[in-house]
């Protein structure tokens, strides 16, 4: 990204800005500001131009006198409200991925697949302006949604990001040199299918992190990694977040919580020729058969399908939001140029 101001938006609201409005009873509305735009609810109309020029954290009233709090969305807010082609990596898992994979400023990171771009946003922030993120996605339509979402959030297509449409196994060797990648994050149905090319791409000591949904996938990828002899023994975990209601002396856990969304599994690349000390007895590859592999098909693990018509609609929404963000970024740049 060419300008740090784009990464840290501040100052008055401008046309094209993404704004989160909190109305009566705490209901949220996320809108892209337009000069002639309006938010219509059963409680009245809020004109966008009443917000343009106000600072973050302002409160405005709609036509019926109901107050709305206006704030630029945080990354977690944006990720939860952005158009989706594929299911997203939730903020609680994205935060753990960045930490457990130890994604650092200036690092070279490979991501597959890109999905709707939610994880890409966290990885781009983590690698910083000196790093590089290469995202692989098999489907062009998913990649289009991800590009629109990332450009909407940053106000431009980041210079540090490249999207490659294609299969990771076939495309990765053509995109990176051997032992040149610091971190690899795999969010896919069968990450074990990619582990050989991942091992070639990773620098010694580099981290591979797999994000999988089911215990059968977790078992399969863990045993495959062990079987290669190229990595440290994998670590597996999941993250569950429980909110709390805190009001005076009424302090209790929320009735609902975000429990299981996925497992994280990490391992580090060994140096060429190195053999890791044995830590426990390992299962043999022969303990898996064709009937086990069948359990890891998209249908068996509940992989959600989205219609082409619905996906085209999501892509249009993402591109429309990205166009507004580019407009806001250009407005900010011109404002700074005149200061």
Image: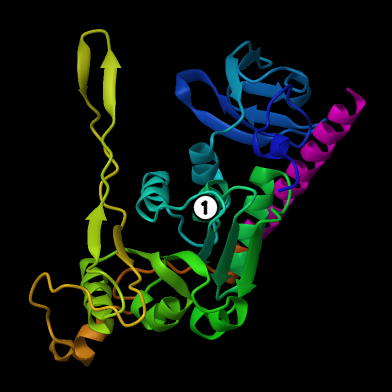
Q: Is residue 283 above or below residue 222?
A: below
In the rendered image, is residue 309 in sight? no
The residue shown at (38%, 79%) is 195
The quadrant of the rendering that contains the C terminus is top right
Bounds of the magenta segment: 314-339
Confirm whether the magenta stretch covers residue 330.
yes
Residue under circle 1? 123
Camera-side residue of 272 and 329: 272
Percent position of residue 335, x then y:
86, 28
Of 187 and 314, the residue lying toward us? 187
Looking at the magenta stretch, what is its main secondary structure? helix
Point out the residue furthest to the top here: 248
Q: Residue at x 83, y 35 (%)?
A: 333
Hey, which quadrant is residue 241 in on the image?
A: top left
Mark 1 surroundings: few (<14), some (14-19) or many (≥20) residues within 10 A: many
Residue 136 falls in image quadrant: bottom right
Kindly state the secondary structure of the residue where label 1 is placed: helix
Measuring from the top left, give residue 84's x and y in whole percent.
54, 56
Which quadrant would residue 281 be assigned to in this image? bottom left
Compared with residue 292, is residue 271 higher up or lower down, i.e. above or below?
Answer: above
Q: Return the x and y of residue 159 as percentages of the image width and height.
A: 71, 56
Identify the residue at image location x=54%, y=55%. Answer: 120
Residue closest to the eye, 27 or 335: 335
Q: How is the image coloured?
A: rainbow
- Is the residue 233 above or below the residue 244 in the image? below
| Spot occupied by residue 98 in the image (x, y as percentages of width and height) | 42, 50
Q: Is residue 40 visible?
A: yes
Q: Is residue 77 above or below residue 141?
A: above
């Amino acid at each position: 990204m060419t300008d740090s101001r784009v990464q840290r938006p501040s100052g008055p609201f401008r046309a094209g800005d993404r704004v989160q409005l909190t109305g009566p009873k705490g209901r949220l509305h996320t809108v892209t500001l337009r000069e002639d735009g309006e938010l219509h609810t059963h409680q009245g109309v809020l004109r966008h131009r009443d917000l343009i020029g106000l600072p973050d954290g302002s409160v405005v009233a709609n036509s019926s006198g109901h107050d709305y709090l206006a704030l630029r969305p945080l990354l977690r807010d944006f990720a939860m409200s952005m158009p989706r082609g594929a299911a997203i990596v939730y903020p609680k898992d994205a935060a753990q991925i960045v930490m457990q994979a130890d994604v650092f400023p200036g690092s070279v990171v490979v991501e597959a697949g890109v999905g709707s771009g939610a994880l890409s946003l966290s990885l781009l922030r983590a690698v910083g302006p000196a790093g590089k993120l290469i995202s692989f996605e098999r489907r062009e339509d998913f990649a289009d949604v991800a590009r629109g979402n990332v450009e909407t959030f940053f106000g431009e297509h980041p210079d540090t990001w490249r999207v490659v449409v294609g299969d990771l196994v076939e495309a990765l060797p053509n995109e990176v040199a051997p032992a040149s990648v610091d971190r690899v994050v795999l969010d896919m149905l069968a990450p074990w299918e990619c582990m050989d090319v991942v091992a070639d791409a990773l620098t010694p000591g580099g981290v591979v992190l797999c994000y999988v949904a089911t215990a059968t996938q977790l078992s399969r990828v863990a045993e495959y990694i062990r079987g290669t002899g190229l990595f440290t023994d994998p670590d597996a975990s999941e993250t569950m977040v429980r909110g709390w209601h805190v009001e005076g002396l009424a302090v209790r856990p929320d009735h609902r919580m975000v429990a299981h969304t996925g497992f994280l599994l990490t391992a580090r690349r060994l140096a060429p020729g190195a053999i890791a000390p044995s830590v426990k007895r390992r299962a043999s590859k022969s303990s898996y058969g064709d009937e086990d592999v069948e359990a890891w098909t998209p249908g068996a693990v509940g992989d959600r399908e989205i219609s082409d018509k619905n996906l085209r609609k999501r892509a249009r929404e993402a591109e429309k939001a990205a166009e507004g963000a580019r407009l806001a970024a250009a407005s900010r740049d011109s404002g700074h140029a005149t200061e």
